Image (spheres, rainbow, N blue to C red):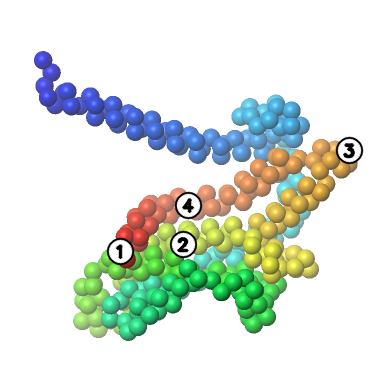
Amino acid sequence: MPSRNEMMSKPIRLGQILIHLLFIFFCLTVILPLILTVIVSFSSEKSVMQYGYSFFPAEWSLAAYKFVFSDNSIFISYGLTALVTVIGTVISVCLCSLAGYVISRSRVKYRNVIAMFLYIPTIVGAGLIPWYYNIKEVLNLANTIWVLILPSVVSSYNIFLIRNYYKGLPDAIVEAAEIDGAGPFYIFLRIMFPLALPITATVTLFVSLGYWNDWYLATWFIDAEHQNLYPLQYYLFQTYRRLNESSGVGGGVTPTETVYLATMFVTMGPIILVYPFVQKYFVKGLTLGGVKG
C-alpha cells in the first residue's frame, strides 16, 4: 500500500506539469508571432498576397529590406533616435532619481508639498494648447533636437516609483553615513543610488522605450524643412504614407505588407538587445517600487 507521501506526490507533479505546459503555451504565443514577423519580412510580396502569412514562404526575397534601406535618411533617423534615447534617458533617470530620493527622506521640509505638486499633473492636465504654446513660443524648442528630449524628461510616475523604493531602504544606512561625516550628495551618489539599482534599471527601461518609440512630438514640432530631425518612428510613419500613396501605381509590385513587417523588426531590434541586460532587475524593481505608499 503506497505511503501518504507517495500519494501526495502525484498531484504535486501533475500540478507542476500543468504549470509548465501553461508557461510553454504562453511563451509560444509570444515567440511564434515574432518568428512569423521575421520570416514574412524576408518573403516576396507576391507570395504573401497569394498564400498569406506563412512560416514556410513560397518565395524568399530581400525586397522589403532593400526598400527600407534604399533611402539614406533612415540611417540619419536611426542615429538621431539613438542619440535622443541615450541623452533623454540619462537626464530623465538622473532627475527622477534625485526627486524621488529627496521626497523619500522624512527630514526634508515640505516634502509632502513637493510630492503633491508632482502628483497633481497625473490627474489634472493644463490642456494641449498651453502645452504646445509653452514648448514652441515660450521655450522656442520647435525644430531642434531638444524638443524630442525635454518634454518627456520628467515623469511623476517614475519619480513615485523611485521614491517608494527609497522609502523601503533602512534609514540607518543614511544615519551611519552622516555619523561618518558624509554629505547629502555623497550619500546619494555613493551609497543610496547603487542600492537602488533594480528600480533604476526598471525606470531606465521605461524611459528608453518611451524615447525610442516616440513619434508624437515630431508630428507637432518638426516641420518638413527639417527632415534630418525626424526620429525613426516618425520617419517610418512617413514611409508608410508614401507606400499607401504609391500602392498600385506603376508596373511593379510594391512590397507593402513585407515592408510593414520589415520596419517592425528593424525598429524593435535595439530594444530587444537592451532588454536582457535589465530584465533581471525589472520585476524586483517594479514590485518593490510599487509596494509602499
Say if mark 1 contacts mark 3, CB within 8 Å.
no
Mark 4 to mark 3: distance in Å? Answer: 43 Å
**Image quadrant in which the N terminus is located:** top left
Would you say residue 232 is visible in this rendering? Answer: no
Taking the spot 35% from the left edge, 78% from the top edge, the residue there is: 112
Q: Earlier in the sequence, mark 4 or mark 2?
A: 2
Compared with residue 287, is residue 3 higher up or lower down, i.e. above or below? above
Rendered residue at 74%/44% (across/down): 66
The residue that appears at 37% across and 53% down in the rendered structure is 283
For marks 1 and 2, give the one nearer the viewer. 1
Identify the disc placed on residue 204: 2
Identified by mark 4, the residue type is Tyr
**Lower sequence index among marks 2 and 3:** 2
- The answer for how far apart the CA atoms under marks 1 and 3 are is 63 Å
Expressed as whole percent of the image width and height from the top left, the position of residue 119 reads: 43, 72
Of labels 1 and 3, the one closer to you: 1
- On residue 254, the disc is none
User: Gap between marks 4 and 2, in whole Å?
Assistant: 10 Å
Label number found at residue 251: 3
The kind of residue on which mark 2 rests is Thr
Foreground disc of the pair 1, 4: 1
Tell me how far mark 1 sits from mark 2, CA to CA: 20 Å
Element type at mark 2? helix
Residue depicted at 24% across the width and 26% down the height: 11
Residue linked to disc 1: 292
Work out which quarter of the rendered image holds the C terminus and state it.
Answer: bottom left
Label 4 vs label 3, nearer the camera: 3
Secondary structure under badge 1?
Answer: loop
User: Mark 4 falls on what kind of element?
Assistant: helix
Pinpoint residue 137: horizontal percent, then vertical percent: 68, 80
Amino acid carrying mark 1 in the image: Lys
In this view of the protein, can residue 6 be seen by the observer? yes
